[in-house]
Image (cartoon, helix red, strand yellow):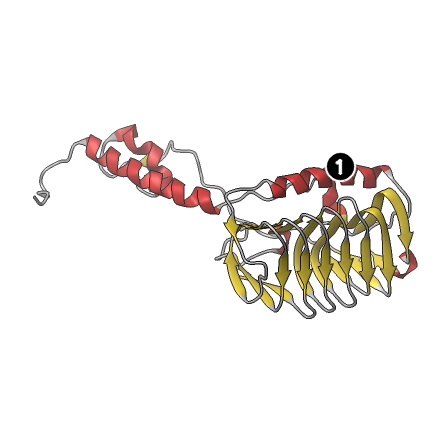
């Protein structure tokens, strides 16, 4: 039976509608949104290794987040004279490097434990992915282009979990569209990462073992090897902080109006868009 426009519905009906809408809103939002991975003191390092660094050919490190480079507990650094950086070159074990390695363990474990996950095929090439956690129980590879779509949300976080290796083909690349930011892309690699010549890669790479960047590979992010070595060869690495960002919802409900005149009964559903915010004078 149609509702007569001159009759009032009971407040309980509006409350039920509001709660249902809120439940749908929360369910849809909770699945998609991931917080960023906390890098701690690791954030200032463009390159961090566990068992030494080897560089062949001119390599440049820069970025607004930091461009430090170092290794711990093995502090060897071969070819450091060919590395140009706006940060600090640590050619021996230093307390700052050791502290960053401790934070790398925490960041690695955080990324590895994120859920819920979407299972992906081994090769990510020619795919467009939205924010979320993507997992391969074995290896991950990239041939061609992987596109990350933030859907106009600058806070969109992308986390990739590789059970074993991460390998890119020559000239492969990661592209960002619709507001996606390199600072919000994370790669957790269960063994070693190898980047082919002239790869154009994006994201913070956490490798349990080693990282090899072949000739001409470029990066927006970090190369962080937890236990093994990092090998560089004429690379460019830019480690920038995030810019802009979204605003959290206003949780002050003191000035919410209920359009159906039932007072505080629907305050809880304000985030579902069922209430009207009074314009402040």
Residue 212 locus on image (x, y percent) = 77, 58
The quadrant the N terminus occupies is: top left
Residue at the far top in the pictured view: 264
Viewer-closest of 169 and 101? 169
In this rendering, is residue 37 above or below 193?
Answer: above
Residue 223 locus on image (x, y percent) = 74, 53
The quadrant the C terminus occupies is: top left
Judge from the rendering whether residue 104 lies leftward or rightward of residue 270; answer left or right.
right
Looking at the image, which residue is at 45% across and 44% down? 31
Judge from the rendering whether residue 233 lies leftward or rightward of residue 143; answer left or right.
right
Disc tally is: 1
**Disc 1, SS:** helix
Q: Indicate the quadrant where residue 219 lies.
A: bottom right
Q: In the rendered image, which residue does mark 1 sit on? A: 102
Judge from the rendering whether residue 169 lies leftward or rightward of residue 147; answer left or right.
right
Residue 95 locus on image (x, y percent) = 85, 37
């Amino acid at each position: 039976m149609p509702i007569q426009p001159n009759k009032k519905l009971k407040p309980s009906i509006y409350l039920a509608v509001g709660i249902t809408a809120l439940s749908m809103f929360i369910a849809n939002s909770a699945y998609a949104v991931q917080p960023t991975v906390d890098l701690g003191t690791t954030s200032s390092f463009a390159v961090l290794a566990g068992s030494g660094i080897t560089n062949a050919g001119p390599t440049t490190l820069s970025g607004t987040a930091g461009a430090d480079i170092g290794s711990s507990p093995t502090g060897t650094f071969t070819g450091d004279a060919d590395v140009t950086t706006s940060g600090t070159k640590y050619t021996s074990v230093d307390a700052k490097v050791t502290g960053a390695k401790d934070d790398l363990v925490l960041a690695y474990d955080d990324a590895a434990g994120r859920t819920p996950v979407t299972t992906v095929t081994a090769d990510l090439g020619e795919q467009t992915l939205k924010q979320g956690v993507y997992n391969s129980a074995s290896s991950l590879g990239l041939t061609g282009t992987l596109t990350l779509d933030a859907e106009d949300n600058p806070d969109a976080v992308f986390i990739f979990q590789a059970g074993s290796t991460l390998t890119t083909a020559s000239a492969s690349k990661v592209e960002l569209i619709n507001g996606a930011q390199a600072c919000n892309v994370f790669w957790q690699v269960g063994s070693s990462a190898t980047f082919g010549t002239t790869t154009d890669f994006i994201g913070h790479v956490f490798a349990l073992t080693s990282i090899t960047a072949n000739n001409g590979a470029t990066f927006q992010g970090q190369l962080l090897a937890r236990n093994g070595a990092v090998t560089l060869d004429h690379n460019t690495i830019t480690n920038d902080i995030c810019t802009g960002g979204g605003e959290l919802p206003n949780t002050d409900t003191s000035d919410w109006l209920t359009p159906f005149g039932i007072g505080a009964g629907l305050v809880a559903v304000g985030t579902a868009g069922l209430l009207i915010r009074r314009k402040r004078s």
